[in-house]
Image (spheres, rainbow, N blue to C red):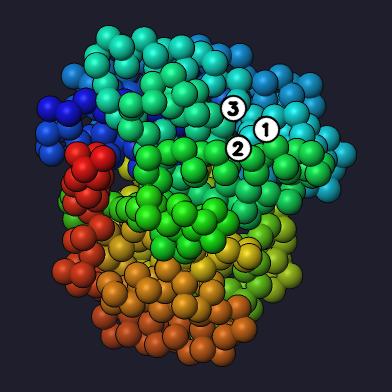
Amino acid sequence: MKKVLVITYYWPPSGGAGVQRMLKFVKYMPHFAVEPFVLTIHENSAFYPVRDNTLLKDVSPHLKIIKTTNTEILKVFSRFLKKKEVPHSGFANHNKNTLSSKILRFLRGNLLIPDARKSWVKAAYKEACLLIEKEKIDTFIISTPPHSSQLIGLRLKKKYPHLKWIADLRDPWTDIYYYNDLLHTAWAKKTDAAYEKQVLQQADAVLVVSKGLKELFSKKYTGTESKIEVIPNGFDEDDFEGPASSPQKEFLISHTGTIAESYNPKIFFSALQKIIQQYQNKCAIKALFIGKTDPGFKQLGRTYQVEKHITYQDYVPHQEVIHYLKNTTCLLLIIAETSNQKGLLSGKLFEYLAAKKPIIAIGPKGGDAEEILQQAHAGALFSRDEEDALVTHFASLIDAWLLNPNLDLNESHIKKYSRKNLTQQLCDLIKQL
């Protein structure tokens, strides 16, 4: 079997969507004659936004995992600023208007480049060298964010130029939707961009999750297009075993995952207000949001006077998320409103597909998300200026539900997004390098 070193900061018991990409790849690699070794940070040294012990079920007892220790600088900053929680993506759990938040973001953006987990690089590099030499490994994969982990790759490539390096970039780097919130100085931006360029140019292959992300990187760095491969996120069929149902007494629309300020969800609240009024004598309409939510999002619920129809729930373990996905009427996907929004392809979209519930998406027309929804016959996407069309579609779903509460979709169009099939694509790439 071909031996591959997988380097990832986020690994169970860390929770969140980003953990699952490498976790599921590693789970299925042995099926395709690839033996993975995992290098990560010890959970007692890590500073995770969320933890989820249920993900440990996918870690084989035979998997060799090396865990390093580290002093987390972000933990020191948070204690100094009396912040109990780690900042989530887009600072969704922080009020960005406070002085302490501005200080934290400035320090993060200018002292910790590329990011706050940079302090892990030295220890991880040392352990990677020992493991490469002991196990005679010839390929390593580094999955990010945190993008600072790719600096390990730069060092390894310099020491072992014969090794094959696959840089897995789950998100944009200097174009990520909350980048401007980090209050960078000109020097910090230049330094960060230089790191990004080195990684794109020196890696032997670059994995991205969407065609839009490939286009973004290819345009920035000419000559890199041929080495960038698109392997999207997906769903693990094992996670979705067992029965599913649909609410009988209320029309329930659910959303899972972090909601940051840049999501700009006004169209959803306005449409929800109208549809509630339209069906107030016919059925109950409810919305459920699971995960960290920007305070401004909840304020919109009050502004549009629909807060009584909305339930907010903090982060729950992944297996519970799947339970909610399988037991709702339909699912809501909101794509952040950013300059590169057409290439944003959230991992939750694929788990939405696996849940087989109709999807209502809000985001850019002609983007990667809309293409997948169309190919899978899984739902419809509306731009933020298509409120009338959104209300009409919303109403059509409710009318169908009133006739038959089960709106579940045909699963024949989603098989190609299974984690096992996607892992085969990755293993084929590993063997070709």
The answer to which of 116 and 347 lies nearer the viewer is 116
Residue occupied by mark 1: 113
Left or right placement of residue 102 versus residue 158 in this view: right
Q: Residues within 10 Å of mark 2 (few under 14, many from 20)?
A: some
Q: Determine crowd level at label 3: few under 14, some 14-19, many 20+ residues with C-alpha closer than 10 A.
A: many
Q: Earlier in the sequence, mark 2 or mark 1?
A: 1
Q: Is residue 312 visible?
A: no
**Image disc number at residue 421:** none
Please give the name of the residue rendered at 57% of the width and 44% of the height, measured from the top-left corner. 197
Question: Residue 171, how many percent across, how many down?
Answer: 51, 49
Quadrant of residue 298 in the image?
A: bottom right
Q: Are marks 2 and 1 in contact (CB under 8 Å)?
A: yes
Measure the C-alpha gap from mark 3 to mark 1: 9 Å
Work out whether residue 317 or residue 123 is closer to the camera in this orientation and state it. Answer: 123
Q: Is residue 342 left or right of residue 137?
A: right
Q: How many marks?
A: 3
Q: Which residue is mark 3?
A: 117
Side of 87 where 365 appears, left or right: left
| Pointer 2 or 3: first along the chain | 3
Query: Which residue is denoted by mark 2 in the rendering?
Result: 195
Mark 1 neighbour density, 10 Å: few (under 14) some (14–19) many (20 or more): many
Where residue 63 appears, x then y in whole percent?
Answer: 23, 21
What kind of residue is marked 3?
Arg
Of the two numbered discs 2 and 1 in the rendering, the one whose residue sits closer to the viewer: 2
Label 3 sits on a secondary structure element that is loop
Compare residues 28 and 353 and report the one nearer the observer: 28
Q: Quadrant of residue 363?
A: bottom right
Against 156, residue 71 (above or below) is above
At 21% from the left and 43% from the top, the residue drawn is 432
Q: CA distance from mark 2 to mark 3?
A: 15 Å
Residue 298 relative to residue 3: left or right: right
Q: Is residue 376 above or below residue 393?
A: above
